[in-house]
Image (cartoon, grey):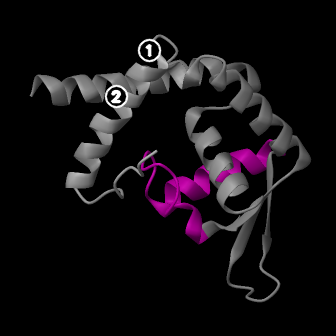
Amino acid sequence: METFSSLLRTREVLVDWMNEQLASLDMSWIDYDLLSVIEFIGGGQMPLGKIRFYVRRFIVHQTSITNVVARLSDRGIVTTHQDANDGRVTVVELTPLGRRRLRRAHTILAEDDFGLGSLSKAEQRTLIELLYAIRRDHKDVHPIAEE
């Protein structure tokens, strides 16, 4: 139980740290995660209904994602439009401002290895291997490729 509790608390600590780091950009960790998914998986745009399959399980309900998208749209970070081929599909697209904010956010978070800067690269690799072992056992990821 102690290990499980420590994992949960560590997640909370890291998300709080990320939210603090992103506050100067008027962004939260959820905003960053969602924008990253749209940019790096969707190439800058993605159907609203598909975003939930990629966000890192902090928000899973489609209504929550829709609310985050609406907030980002109100701030000019994303736009939404109907898909040209299927009018039932809403597409979310990063604006130039959204891309700039995402790049800046990534730079800010990467400066301290996304909150893990106190660990050496070897310690980070060991942590990844341990966490992947748990996730693999629960059928969440594929095994780590041999280097």
Write the residue at 56% across / 40% down: 30
Tell me where the magenta segment starts and ends, as one range. 49-76
Question: Which residue is farthest right?
Answer: 96
Percent position of residue 135, x then y: 28, 49
Q: Which mark is residue 126?
A: 2
Q: Is residue 76 left or right of residue 27?
A: right
Percent position of residue 88, x then y: 68, 84
Residue 26 visible? The answer is no
Q: Secondary structure at mark 2?
A: helix
Q: Secondary structure at mark 1?
A: loop
Disc 2 to disc 1, how far (Cα)? 10 Å
Q: Which mark is residue 68?
A: none
Percent position of residue 10, x then y: 34, 23
Please, what is the three-letter code of the amino acid marked with disc 1?
Leu
Q: Is residue 5 left or right of residue 101?
A: left
Question: Which residue is farthest front?
Answer: 147
Position above or below: 99 against 108: below
Q: Is residue 46 or residue 109 the one in the foreground?
A: 109
Write the residue at 48% across / 21% down: 121
Q: Which residue position is annotated with label 1?
A: 119
Please, what is the three-letter code of the amino acid marked with disc 2?
Thr
Percent position of residue 141, x then y: 35, 56
**Residue 54 falls within the magenta-colored stretch:** yes
Position above or below: 88 against 137: below
